[in-house]
Image: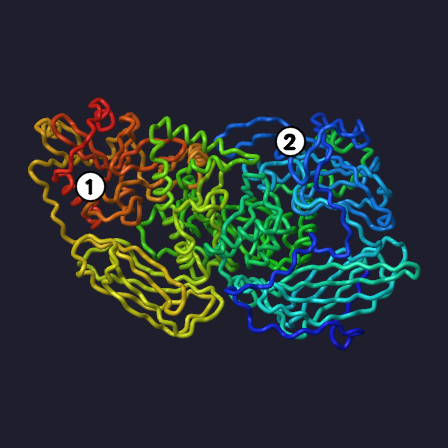
Amino acid sequence: MINRIRFSLSQSLLLGVMLVAAMAGSACQRNFKVSEAPIQPHFFQWQTATIPLSGTWDFGLDPEHLGIKERWFSQKLTDTVTLPGTTDENKKGQFIDERVDDRLSRVWFWKGAAWYQKEVEIPADWIGKRIQLFLERTKDTHVWVNDTYVGYENTLSGPQFFDLTAAAKEGTNRLSLLIDNSILPPVGPAHAIDERTQTNWNGVVGRLELQATDPVWIDQVQTYPDVANNRVKVVATIGNITSNPVNGTMEVQAESWNVRDPVTFKGYKQELVQLVDGQTLEFFYDFGTLAPRWDEFDPALIRLTISLSVTDGISSYRHSMVTDFGMREFVQKGKHLLINGDRVFLRGRIDCANYPLTGYAPMDRESWLGMFRLLKAYGINHWRFHTWFPPKEALVAADMVGVYLQPELPNKRSGMDLRSMDDEEAMKVHNPDYLAISGSKFNMTLKDYLHKEAELIFRYFGNHPSFTLFTLGNELGRNPSMFELVAGFKEMDSRRLYAQGSNNMHWEPSFAEGDDFWVISRTDTNLHVRGANFHGAVSSGHVDNLPPSTLIDYDHSIGHVEVPVIAHETGAYQVSPDFSEIPKFTGVTRARNFELFEQRLKDAQMYDQYPAFVAASGKLAAICYREEVEAALRTSDLAGFQLLDIMDFPGQGTAPVGILNVFMESKGLIEPEEWRRFCSEVVPLLKMEKYTWTNEETFSAQVDVAHYGKSDFLNPTLIWELKDRKGKTYRIGKLQNGDIRKGMLHEVGKISFPLNEILVAEKLTLTLSIEGTSYSNKYDVWVYPESVDLKVPDETLVSRRLDAKTMQHLESGGKVILFPEHDRLPYSIRGAFQTDYWSYPMFLRSALNQGKEPAPGSLGFVCDPDSPLLANFPTEFHSNWQWWHLVKNARPIILDNTPADYRPLVQTIDNFARNHKLGMIFETKMGKGSVLVCAIDIPNLQHLPEARQLYYSLIQYVNSPVFSPQFALDTSLIAQILP
């Protein structure tokens, strides 16, 4: 039975007044240097003596699971390793140096039992104290001290603690760990243990140490901010192994940090009587002066120190515990997420535990501070940890930077009655009868395991203000046990929001009643909340399937939903692999997949083009990502999105989908400042019906501002300006429409002007800027002459086939523009605008299994924008929105059997699995003549100004002296690909 003492630490109850400090000034801004409190001992325990255990350990592999039976804990092991570390890092196990193409390849591999042993000197003054072993992160673990078995733990999310008090003796002690990564809870391929992500490593990472406290100590402290009343409820649990009640005092101190002007608040002292083991002290700490709030803009933190000084009448005991928290209230109100009463829009990314150098996530604070700050520069304010829980220092760093986190239980299974082992003989091997393992931990059902994991998570990580959302896992089903778990979590810890999972029931979407929010890709069969999907989906997204505009939103998709909706795994636009990254994989994994792809491209005789493929596909991917983000921002009640991903995912089929590589290094595709134009707390948005216009039309568009920033804009001026590529200003104007309030999508006004000043085809840029701020956005607009001269000179023939008439014209030395009929192209692929979704091989199998046509699999195209072919058609070297109708109505032709150095003029980029040489526009000599082949169905697109303009550019090119193909492709090959 737990005893509780409740009291309030207000001035009227003071028995002793401690420090008083001045009130902090105005809310801190993030453009100044903030105070960073000194790094405290891990898990913030003071007056805890420690013996570090990092360094050399004796080691032995136990492939036959004989170590327990043969009492290895009583023997000296013959090998050595370094901890913290893994068997991979220590080069133990099997040297496999595997070469797989669907993920990164491990060099060393071990899955099974491994023993770690170290002799430790216990000082005399530790005897009589409470002693525990702390392992920050490991797997299924048994521990012995000398010959005494002291415990078992199998958490994948929290730290592991083992009580050594009764077993340890003064002097030399032999500490033995049996860690077995072949015994895993029934969680499926969660990213916490998945070979395709951080690998299923064996070892101990992070901190490992012995800890000693007096036999009366503060076992844990939980903080529950009460923002409205400027106070925090504190729940402290006392440990007492003296067998006697104790009396004494508790002192409480609080100070702010990570702010411009740190404040030390009033300290309090309270008498305590008759404290026994497990007793809970529950009280409110009133700050007196206003405590700073925590959010993404001002992540102010408060450090709470509780000091215990007690006696049992014979001996005196002291212990202190320190914990950090933030004064914040993160809640759901209807469709919206609120922090401290202000609406939050989550601009997120998904961390799938891809850390290729170590095979596990960083365990230090500085690494996480660097990552969070880097992605904040890209406007990211939210991270979802896909089926794993990050280490302590990740949460500390997120607290400091101001990032909203959605960790998850390490789970990708729905069967809550599943167990790790159903075979009795297997259980005997792994749990011999003579080991006193608690039945509550070993071979638990999935439901019981997840409940235990959550309890540990809430205990050790619950105070972190960045820990705002929590789910049971990814893409699960639904059953009564899941409802019970979520309801239980909400009862256990009210400091965050809960849901059954991310994208659960995605095959038949429906909301799980009782969830606080809904992370989903579509809210019903055809009601999407993201712009792209795998090709086997019921229906695909708008980026590749609806004519381009900036009008698409998801208002209709979420109209019937009554809770916040967060778009699941948004994006997944492939970028061609960058082989210059291969030498960077110097750790426990190697990019053998990239090496295989590199060889394939060499075999396809296009290796020299890979930098251009990376750049062109990457630029297009960034364009597609922008549309994803802006469509989400255009949706007035959407709660946010989670990108998959802003960085590459080199596993699960290999998905190089990032604008950053897996090391979080830029690929040079888009600068953070440019990305933040459309992915930021404040984004000016242009709503126009199309990207391509004629000079006889009047341009019209609406201007909105998505404002989820810190403060209202009071009657701001929005400046818009239209310029050409040379910087000439065509139009400029201003809009005002009252105040722009934070936490909403605000309509500013309309822009309208004639385009008759544009006499030739032009790419223009329309810039929107909020005057007096850094918030600005830019939009490309293409304007073409309404009328172009499409008369074809007599010496040029336009044809759909290489028929007798066409061949005769060529034989006479004529020129031909060939638009081959698409149904007569046996060696071609379907046209696409967006780059391929996620990983072509992975979803190729999925489509074929469902009896559906596979995705086109292409990654945009590459061309020379200065080529005379395109002299009259403004373009970059990559695809953009003016090409959408053109590439969607194309069938790029497979030119694999052309000469090695033959290059199409407009070359579609293929994926790393096929590596076809694909021609969208190419040329060749034929007989005495020359032919330009265009696989775009331009003759049937003449209602589009961009099609007419491209046709005009082709005509001008063919009838110029520069049209002189350098290659004469083999006639039998031409007959084959152009029958």
664 and 498: which one is in front?
664
- As helix, strand or loop, the secondary structure at mark 2 comes to loop
Image quadrant where one finds the N terminus: bottom right
- Above or below residue 46? Residue 668 is above
Asked if the residues shown at circle 1 and circle 2 are in contact, with their CB atoms under 8 angstroms apart, the answer is no
Label 2 sits on what residue type?
Lys
Residue 735 relative to residue 453: left or right: left
For label 2, the residue is 111
Pick whichever of labels 1 and 2 is earlier in the sequence.
2
Nearer to me, 717 or 386:
717
Q: Determine whether 967 is above or below 486 in the image.
A: above
Q: Position of residue 330 (x, y in %)?
A: 58, 62
Q: Residue at x 58, y 55 (%)?
A: 398
Query: Residue 869 — which label?
Result: 1
Q: Residue furthest left?
A: 794
Name the residue rendered at 59%, 67% in the picture. 293
In the shown orientation, is residue 447 left or right of residue 589?
right
Task: Give left or right: position of 921 versus 171.
Answer: left
CA gap, disc 1 to disc 2? 58 Å
Question: What's the mark number on residue 894?
Answer: none
Q: Quadrant of the C terminus?
A: top left
Residue 30: where, in percent of width, then height?
52, 64
Residue at 47 percent of width and 64 percent of height: 708
The reply to whether residue 601 is visible in this rendering is: yes
Q: Is residue 419 visible?
A: no
Q: How is the image coloured?
A: rainbow
Residue 514 at what x, y percent from top left? Answer: 59, 56
Q: Residue at x 34, y 64 (%)?
A: 703
Q: Which quarter of the figure has residue 540?
A: top left
Q: Check disc 1 and give the amino acid type.
A: Leu
The residue carrying pointer 2 sits among few (fewer than 14), some (14 to 19) or many (20 or more) residues within 10 Å by Cα, namely: some
Of badges 1 and 2, nearer the viewer stands 1
